[in-house]
Image: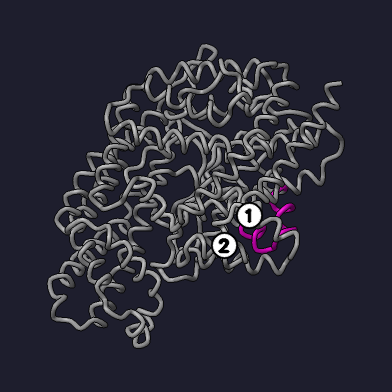
């Protein structure tokens, strides 16, 4: 099995003639856009709309291929200046066309009767939801000239600060046991069965951040200031208001979800203290033991064993899911192992409806957690697959729902493994693995949400130095983890290592994980109730995500997401797992 992905389905290299040919096609499409804008008043509504939609399809298809290719190359070789140059090249092309792009969107937003045009045109009918969404977005447009200037300045502003964070963290050398390792490698040691290794790795990680924390603090301040001030110009009431708009999610849904999570924080703390107890800690769980494996599940999975586990498990869900996973393993979709210059974490990247494939990055270490991570990312790939036959401009779904298919897979895998477990030690290990993930998605995500909220508020009046940011992070952990964590051993630098804070176009990429986790839990309950009938409805819901709001996605499955009851029901299931975990801990501690 190949351990690195193959990108030739896009291009062979940045010198591939096909790559240059597509750059040329993109330039021609931008030129056509300019001509449409210049001659818009000479066209009737239908002609103008169809021309804009056709050229937009062309541009989107090309941009998916070109940007994905460069970003995938950079993610495994972040030191490569040639790749950075190509990304800047694409950014410059986009910036030059920014005013015309906004002008086209304005022309679509000004269409007086979309339904009437849709009755005359199959193309317009296909993109009714897309056009109506643009009508909503138009309320937040800057002028054409301002959009062009912003796009140009963002290249050396927020986008550049974000690239700095990615570069510094992916190339950071961590001093550990007389050698230097990558940040991804040291963070993977948090899952070691050896307590001394976990503690030493944590201390080495914390020490390493001193090398980059000040530079990254500058990046975070400037990104958040840019996000907030540009948002004001776009008539958003706050960065959260903008994030919810982009998420197609109501504040009522967000409030209902976090209100329910608040109610169950004592249960998560109960889990953490029980885990601390079995590990020999009497004052809450030290941060370095959050991911400590418990029980007898220290098995290391080879890639073949990982593949077999996932295929066997998900065949019980649907042959469609297991077939996609088989394709990913066997057709070089996955880049598995950490290496110098490769970014940390894991992600899925859909390659669009022309190619109908995905690529998955992970930093595989053979643990069950890594198997679980692959199930998560291949859930994203399954979502991509449901959109494979949808129109080019109907591919983009909002943040919160993006984490649903992935988390559903984790929920399904966890339940499958727990059913197979024999004996308290194995059950403890699997329950702990599940509760680690739940704690990250509920408690840690909540802390990140509180942290980002505070940073936006405080950067309006002051520049936050690294120590200020660390204090805010510790305060957020106090409010969420509470006495579940050892007060002397938290993680003040979580703001440094998490890349989600460093986007110039996307704020609050934290609550979608909590949403996806709890929504997936509710969907799993529906699966247990309805079986195969549910899975057909589930696939249809995923297919419709680009044209639905979050609340409409819920309604597709008979769920009112603005009501606290749905979220409470999902959390009650997690509470049951915590109860079982604590019972086993008490039994084994006697």
Horizontally, is 516 left or right of 494 in the view? right
Residue 55 in the image: above or below residue 380 = below
What is the x, y in percent for residue 27? Answer: 22, 61
Q: Residues within 10 Å of mark 2 (few under 14, many from 20)?
A: some
Residue identified by numbered label 2: 554
SS at mark 1? helix
What is the x, y in percent for residue 292? Answer: 66, 26
| Residue range corresponding to the magenta coloring | 309-326
Residue 139 in the image: above or below residue 588 = below
Q: Earlier in the sequence, mark 1 or mark 2?
A: 2
Front in this rendered view, residue 208 or 110: 110
Q: Are marks 1 and 2 in contact (CB under 8 Å)?
A: yes
What is the x, y in percent for residue 104? Answer: 23, 67
Quarter holding the C terminus is: top right
- At x 82%, y 31%, the residue is 584
Number of numbered callouts drawn: 2
Residue 174 in the image: above or below residue 116 = above
- At x 21%, y 56%, the residue is 142
């Amino acid at each position: 099995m190949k351990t690195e992905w193959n990108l030739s389905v896009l291009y062979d290299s940045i010198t591939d003639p096909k790559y240059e040919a597509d750059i040329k096609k993109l330039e021609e499409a931008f030129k056509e856009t300019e001509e449409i804008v210049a001659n818009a008043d000479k066209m009737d509504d239908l002609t103008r709309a169809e021309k804009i939609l056709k050229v937009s399809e062309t541009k989107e298809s090309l941009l998916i291929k070109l940007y994905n290719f460069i970003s995938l190359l950079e993610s495994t070789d972040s030191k490569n200046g040639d790749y950075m140059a190509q990304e800047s090249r694409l950014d410059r092309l986009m910036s030059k066309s920014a005013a015309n792009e906004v002008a086209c969107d304005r022309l679509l937003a000004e269409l007086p009767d979309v339904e009437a045009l849709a009755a005359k045109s199959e193309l317009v009918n296909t993109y009714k939801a897309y056009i109506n969404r643009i009508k909503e977005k138009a309320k937040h447009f800057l002028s054409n000239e301002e959009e062009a200037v912003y796009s140009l300045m963002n290249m050396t502003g927020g986008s550049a600060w974000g690239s700095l964070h990615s570069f510094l963290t992916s190339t950071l050398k961590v001093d550990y046991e007389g050698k230097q390792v990558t940040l991804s490698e040291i963070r993977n040691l948090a899952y070691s069965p050896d307590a001394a290794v976990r503690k030493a790795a944590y201390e080495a990680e914390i020490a390493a951040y001193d090398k980059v924390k000040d530079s990254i603090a500058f990046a975070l301040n400037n990104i958040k200031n840019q996000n907030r001030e540009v948002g004001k110009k776009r008539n958003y009431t706050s960065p959260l208001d903008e994030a919810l708009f982009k998420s197609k999610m109501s504040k009522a849904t967000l409030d209902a979800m976090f209100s329910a999570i608040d109610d169950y924080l004592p249960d998560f703390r109960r889990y953490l203290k029980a885990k601390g107890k079995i590990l020999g800690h009497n004052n809450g769980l030290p941060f370095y033991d959050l991911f400590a494996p418990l029980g007898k599940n220290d098995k290391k999975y080879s890639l073949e064993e990982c593949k077999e586990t996932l295929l066997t498990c998900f065949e019980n869900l649907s042959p469609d899911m297991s077939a996609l996973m088989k394709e990913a393993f066997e057709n070089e979709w996955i880049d598995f192992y950490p290496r110098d210059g490769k970014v940390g974490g894991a992600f899925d990247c859909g390659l669009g409806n022309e190619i109908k494939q995905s690529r998955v990055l992970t930093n595989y270490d053979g643990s069950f957690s890594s198997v679980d991570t692959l199930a998560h990312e291949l859930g994203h790939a399954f979502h991509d697959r449901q959109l494979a036959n949808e129109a080019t401009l109907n591919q983009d779904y909002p943040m919160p729902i993006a984490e649903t298919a992935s988390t559903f897979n984790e929920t399904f895998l966890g339940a499958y493994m727990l059913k197979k477990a024999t004996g308290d030690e194995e059950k403890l290990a699997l329950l702990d693995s599940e509760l680690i993930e739940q704690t990250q998605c509920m408690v840690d995500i909540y802390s990140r949400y509180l942290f980002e909220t505070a940073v936006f508020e405080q950067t309006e009046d002051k520049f936050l130095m690294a120590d200020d940011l660390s204090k805010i992070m510790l305060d957020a952990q106090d409010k969420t983890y509470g006495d579940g964590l050892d007060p002397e051993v938290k993680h003040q630098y979580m703001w440094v290592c998490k890349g989600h804070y460093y986007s110039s176009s996307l704020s609050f990429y934290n609550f979608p994980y909590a949403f996806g986790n709890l929504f997936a839990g509710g969907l799993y309950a529906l699966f247990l109730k309805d079986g195969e009938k549910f899975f057909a409805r589930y696939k249809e819901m995923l297919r419709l995500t680009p044209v639905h709001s979050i609340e409409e996605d819920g309604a597709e499955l008979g769920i009112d997401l603005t009501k606290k009851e749905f979220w409470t029901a999902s959390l009650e299931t997690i509470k049951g797992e915590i109860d079982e975990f604590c019972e086993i801990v008490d039994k084994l501690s006697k």
